[in-house]
Image (cartoon, grey):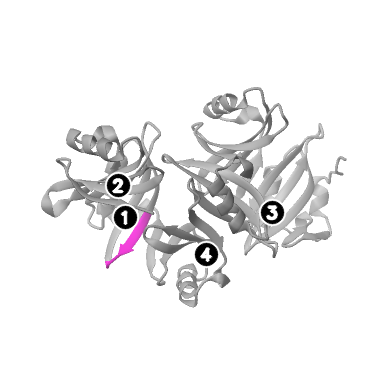
Amino acid sequence: MQKDSIPFYALLLGLGCLAVLGTNTLALGLPDMPPAVQKTIGSNSAGRTVSTIERKDDDGAVTYEVETTAKDGEEWELTVAEDGTLLSIEIPPAELPVAVQTAVTSQLGQGKMEGVEKLLDDGQTTYQVGIAAPSGDERDFTFGEDGTLISEEVNLAELTPDLQTAITTLVGKGALEGIDKTFDHNETTYEATMTTPAGQERNFTLSETGTLLSEEVSLAELPAKIQTAIKAQVGKGKLEGIDETFDGAGIAYEATVTPPGGQEHNVTISALGNLLSQEVTLADVPPEVQTAITAQVGQGKLEGIDKNFSFGKITYAATMTTPDGQESNFIVSAQGVLLSQDVSLEEVPTPVKDTINQTIGDGTIIEIDQINMIAKHTVRYKIEGEKDGKPVTFSIGPRGNVSAVEDEE
């Protein structure tokens, strides 16, 4: 059944809240929107009428989902943040970048494209494309602007028994809403979305072996000292969300914060309540650090910088995209000295390469980190990989000697 469309100007004259749709969701008229949201809706619905607007509040993160109808009856949706930022908008397939169109075609096969959504997140643009297989099974695929496949929707039944068990256990008495298989820097993870028994939407991320890497939590769930530390970072700003993360270094809490009139950024708090890292911009770092980062990025693209606090020392961890489209990380000291950088197997000395191949065998190399040992005027290589289905980390000297091997259970 086609929904009745409400002209944009009519919504401007509407009478506010229309009905409660469910937990933390309201159907609203345009006058109930903040002025910035009204402006964004108006500038992105030209030529179409606005059918519905839903206000969603997910643990304090307010968004507005807007459905519009074109003259031919086709429906188009967009999502707007409370400050008026456009978060997503449906677009015609013809508006996809050429590289994305090519990537989508390679995924289509005998299937059919069902819809295209342009997603805008903190300066990064991605495209989510729905593809229906001949069997009728519809899935979403997400691509970067260069056509790189970032994630694809999968079903629980397709996963390994370990992953199925882990996801089912974490969902518990809640409802599993969906699973995305994501690809990032030679690492594959699975991000699941669930609805808790209380009706809250939560995400959690698992490794290929079913190990829990992170899960979304609320501030009220955390120990008092963690709450205090996060509140200190938020100040008079706004807390957008918190992820509890699990890795070899232990438990940490990554909070997304928007300061008053500022840009959204992440801060990481240790299990003891100490500030571990803070996302910063190039303009925020000392001049000598700016120079070092700019030189290292070269013709590539700087993706982000984290200011790290460890044992009283400050370092800057930067992520970049190389000119050939590869993601790479490096660390610079507070004095602008390059401390470490990602390298490929082809870039390491032959003795180091031989030792890596012998140690990993038919396993997988995940990352090679070249560590510059300034005081000793030499380098060391830290390798993270997977062998016999288990993570393994080891270090190699420049002559190929293994200094440490650590199997991670």
144 horizontally vs 133: left or right:
left
Q: What residue would you read off at disc 1?
A: 316
Q: What residue would you read off at disc 4?
A: 260
Quarter of the rendering occupied by the N terminus: top right
Which amino acid is tagged 3?
A: Tyr
Q: Which mark is residue 293?
A: 2
Q: Is residue 116 visible?
A: no
Badge 2 marks a residue whose secondary structure is: helix
Give the magenta part as a residue range.
306-312
Q: Quadrant of residue 44?
A: top right
Q: Is residue 296 visible?
A: yes
Q: Residue furthest left?
A: 376
For marks 1 and 3, the one nearer the N-term is 3
User: What percent of the width, then of the height, locates residue 17?
Assistant: 80, 61
Q: Are marks 1 and 2 in contact (CB under 8 Å)?
A: yes
Q: What residue would you read off at disc 3?
A: 64
